[in-house]
Amino acid sequence: MVDSALSRPGQRERYDSKLAQIDWVFVGLLATLTGIGILLLYSVGGMKWEPWAFKQLVTFCACMAFMLLLALVDLRVWLMGAYWFYGASLLLLVAVEAVGDVRMGAQRWLSVGGFGFQPSEFMKLAIVLALARFYHECSAKDANWSWKLLIPAAMIGVPAVLVMHQPDLGTAVLISLTGLAVMILAGLNWKVIAAGAAAAAVAIPLAFEFVLHEYQRQRILTFLNPEEDPSGSGYHILQSKIAMGSGGLLGKGLGLGSQSQLNFLPEKHTDFIMAAVCEELGFAGGFMIFLLYGAIILMALRMASLSHSHFGRLAAAGATATFALYVLINGAMVMGLFPVVGVPMPLVSYGGSAMLMVMTGFGLVLGVKVHRYQELPRQASIFQRFE
């Protein structure tokens, strides 16, 4: 006899609160990682709560409450709102092109009532939800190889091009890689992956020459040889390497890092905060942070695998992939293994927009775990009429 969903572990006590189903160990890891980030922001801010540490603490508390609220949301709400969220995010990206604010030479921001935000941050999660819904309504055969794969390709390509035009190379790369990760998780044929890799190998030199802005090309050339211009374009990565190397095994101690405290290290509170971590906490501190990242990613992927719905598995795994790509790109960037593209280290770097989207994504992951036995029926897709 097959047990019903209500008789499975975690569902036998029908009066259990949804809060009891939340993975509190996972929540604790997020709080621990963010707490370390706040401690470093306190340190690089001159051992003061202002200008970064206190604001980051307040932002995290608000985002944590929002994340726990989202964990209680029924998966059907996420499913029904997926395309709407994607459409709204796409419209906001178009609005940036028309009326966006220009800051530091880039048109990436919208201002509403004195509050500024980057719509491209919303697209990182919107693309995951939209693709998860698309594949939820697709057959396994279509997900593997079909003309219908042009649809998710366009869903990824349009926002990536808009973000690239702002210009924001880092976010465009994140959107593209996240979308590709969801397509692969959905069962994309390996021959398509190989063909795409070959096409990318051909397109990258052409994009370098005809698509990228001059400063973006310079970043890539600097990545290949930062010593050529140590006081100019190579300054960021060279100072990052100096800071990381000078920390040794155990670091110089909080507030004692020369590169960060004397402001030799640029963007020490955002893009290059991991360099400050290694300078003040040493290799041991940096290794501990990456262990926390690894534990968070593995736990999130496990929660994704528990879902009985295709949408839940893909959405949670896609949100986790976005987080993992943040970590991978920023970590490689500060070590000089990837061009400087302006991608923050999630939950450690200062910034409200990135933290809100990361915590929203983890709210989805926790919600998938809470509602893991919910089976979402596959709805009729508009593309079925062409079958």
Image (spheres, helix red, strand yellow):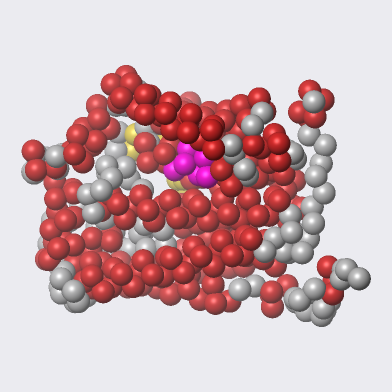
At x 67% / y 64%, what residue is drawn?
306
Compared with 49, 363 (above or below) is: above
At x 79% / y 52%, what residue is drawn?
376
x and y percentages locating residue 209 in the rendered image: 28, 21
Compared with 224, 253 (above or below) is: below
| Nearer to us in this view, 335 or 93 | 335
x and y percentages locating residue 271 in the rendered image: 30, 53
* Res 312 quadrant in image: bottom right
Left or right: 21 with respect to 344?
Answer: right
x and y percentages locating residue 91 in the rendered image: 58, 32
* Res 227 quadrant in image: top left
Left or right: 333 with respect to 98?
Answer: left
Q: Which residues are magenta?
A: 174-181
At x 53% / y 56%, what residue is drawn?
320
| Magenta stretch holds residue 178 | yes
Compared with 220, 358 (above or below) is: below
| Nearer to us in this view, 203 or 347 | 203
| Nearer to us in this view, 387 or 52 | 387
Compared with 183, 99 (above or below) is: above
At x 33% / y 63%, what residue is drawn?
52
x and y percentages locating residue 94 in the rendered image: 52, 29
Residue 40 is at least partly visible in this image: no
| Magenta stretch holds residue 3 | no
Left or right: 64 with respect to 314?
Answer: left
Secondary structure mostly seen in the magenta stretch: helix
Residue 273 is at least partly visible in this image: yes
Q: Quadrant of the C terminus?
A: top right
Q: Quadrant of the N terminus?
A: bottom right
